[in-house]
Amino acid sequence: MSPEFIFGREEERQRIDQHLAKAHPFLIYGPSGVGKTLLLRSVLSQYSTVLYCEDSSTINVVFRSVARHLLRLGSPRAKSAFHNEDGIKLKSPVSLKGVVMDSLNEGKYSIILDHLKRPSYSFAAAVREMMGWGSTPVSAVARSSHMEDTGFLQPFYGDRSQKCEIHNFDDPIAEQFAREMTKRAHLSATNMSEFLDKVLEFSGGNPGAIVALIDMATYPKYRSAEHIKITPLYIDFRMNGNAATR
């Protein structure tokens, strides 16, 4: 089970929307499972020229993702160089980068890098080229605004106005969210009240963790008749890295 709706996040959605509308570089950050990607995707459909890179593990992966977006948007330079998406795979990294940079200069695009993996100096240098010579705003999504997550991209988002932090839910909203998710999961138990209290305690208000805990409670191994076996569920939850997602 995963969240299929945006709950209690209208203010954050509006802030992300405002950043996208300005077409300036910005950083969305918050803990894993807080819903950064979900929020971002909920507004991206309004911005056809925002090139979203779901996987930003390496700069070559980013260039290939951007190339696919440019091709789908009908960029003349991309169409001439690639013809189709199979053509992107045939290009060397150097050739691919050249075509992408030329294509970016044809129009007013912006790029969003999601799921970063501690970007290196060379990664940041390529991004700097896109932002400078290519005049393309490059934004990012990360778990924190610090070096351990944003790597060498950190200086690009040094101004406070460029940062959009997404927090875990406070207690009242977390409880409302947990109750809504139990309804959607058709979850019932004789110890439901105790289970929900533990969900709020274990999750710390993290929506991804709340969803994961409720999802686990539907598995037969954590059920005894109409009773949820909370302790083994929590142990497995902890061992699985909290099962929280972006």
Image: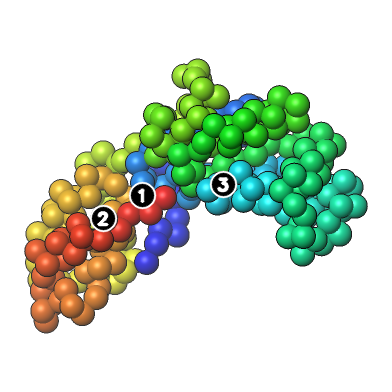
Q: Is residue 55 above or below residue 87?
A: above
Q: What mark, if any, has residue 58 been given in the picture?
A: 3
User: In the rendered view, does 45 fall on the left or right side of 233?
Assistant: right
Whole-percent x and y of residue 230? Answer: 11, 65
Residue drawn where x is 60% and y is 40% of the image: 112
> Looking at the image, is mark 1 or mark 2 earlier in the sequence?
1
Q: Are marks 1 and 2 in contact (CB under 8 Å)?
A: yes
Few, some or many residues within 10 Å of mark 3 (<14, 14–19, 20+): some
Task: Report the residue marked by disc 1.
Answer: 33
- Which of the two discs, 1 and 2, sits closer to the camera? 2
Viewer-side residue, 103 vs 117: 117
> Looking at the image, is mark 1 or mark 3 earlier in the sequence?
1
- The type of residue carrying mark 3 is Thr
Looking at the image, can residue 240 be seen?
yes
- Which of the two discs, 1 and 3, sits closer to the camera? 3
Q: Secondary structure at mark 1?
A: loop
Residue drawn where x is 73% and y is 60% of the image: 89
Q: Quadrant of residue 190?
A: bottom left
| Cα distance between the residues tagged 1 and 3 | 22 Å
The quadrant of the picture occupied by the N terminus is bottom left
Q: Is residue 105 above or below residue 117?
A: above
Task: Report the residue marked by disc 2.
Answer: 242
